[in-house]
Image (cartoon, rainbow, N blue to C red):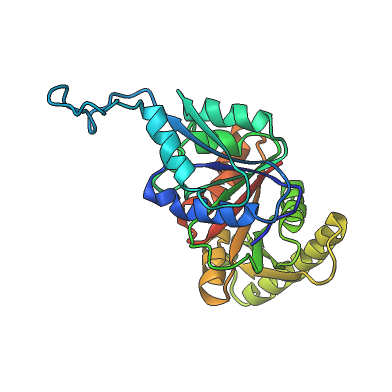
Amino acid sequence: MTAATDCNLLLATDLAPRCDRATDRAIALARGSRGRAVAATVVEPAERSARNVPRHDLPGWYTEPTDAQLARQRLQREFEGESRRWDVHVGEGTAGDQVTALLDAMVPALVVTGPVRGGALGPAVLGSTVDRLLRRPETTLLMVHERAHRPYRRLLLASDFSEACGLALRRARELFPAAALTVLHGYSVPMLGLLDTTRDQALADTRAQLRAEGRAFLRDVGIGDDVELLVEHGDPARLVQQYVDSVGADLVVLGTHGRGAIHELVVGSVARRMLTTVLADMLVVHG
């Protein structure tokens, strides 16, 4: 289950059960890597309400640990028996600040965490830690939904043939060079509902044009002819889930790029819907 041998890896976890699968995948990926492996969690500044220990009748051997000490103990237990050395980091404060500071010292790095839904690093809303990571230049984020039974064998890139998707494609190939790769482009035809006899022809003409653009895109990226290119009419997020359900993909790859508020509302919304609705591991590369 190895990634590229020189890849730095950062596991970001809140130690909740939803991050267990991400931890297992990170451990598997790190075994074949010579890069730095860091596991990080953050203790938020909150009161210790659920675990308050009564101050009377305490055993003589009892010393009350801090939240940070407890988190470190739990995190260290995750790597007991691993021959691969992991650096354990427990921060206190804001998760976004802590993770960003770690990444500054690890560029480039693959960040591994749990799924957006439920918030492994916070809710998937503007200004959250996940959103902050997705906007960080040169960030590669792996969101793990599935159990790590095997290496990633089949990758699906949801592509709009943009420069950001080209970067995501190259990054995915660097990380998982042995995996088969399919590029899927979903498209729409303006005012298609107003067409009658020419509807099928409009779809066919658009598909042919986009297939040519897709092949040019792959050549520009420098990817060989072994990549499968699919151009389909329909909503990209729905098509991706249909492919995962019907054909199968171990990992869905997305490329994102910030080009201002209007771009984020239109194109960025597609990526956001995939992150919150597609039930598969997701590799998100920010250009």
> Residue 117, position in %: x, y?
42, 49
Would you say 273 lies left or right of 175 here?
A: left
Where residue 10 appears, as percent x and y from the top left, is 60, 41
Which residue is depicted at the point 40% across and 50% down? 18
> In this view of the protein, which residue sits in the foreground, 25 or 182?
25
Q: Quadrant of the C terminus?
A: top right
Q: Is residue 32 above or below residue 192?
A: above
Q: Is residue 14 visible?
A: no
Name the image quarter holding residue 135: top right
Q: What residue is shown at x 69% (from left), y 75% (from top)?
A: 201
Query: Where is 14 relative to 117, above or below?
Result: above
For the N terminus, the quadrant is bottom right
The reply, left or right, for residue 2 in relation to residue 50 is: right
Left or right of residue 73, residue 133 in this image: right
Q: Where is 103 relative to 22, above or below?
A: above
Q: Nearer the viewer, residue 127 or 24?
A: 24
Q: Most extreme residue toward the front, as rendered? A: 60
Q: Nearer the viewer, residue 97 or 20?
A: 20
Residue 199: x and y, percent? Answer: 62, 73
Q: Which residue is at a point 62% across and 65% down the rendered structure image?
A: 151
Write the residue at 41% across / 28% down: 68
| Depth order, front residue of 49/75 | 75
Q: Judge whether 151 appears above or below 284 on screen.
A: below
Q: Quadrant of residue 155?
A: bottom right
Tell me residue 145's x, y (percent).
48, 57
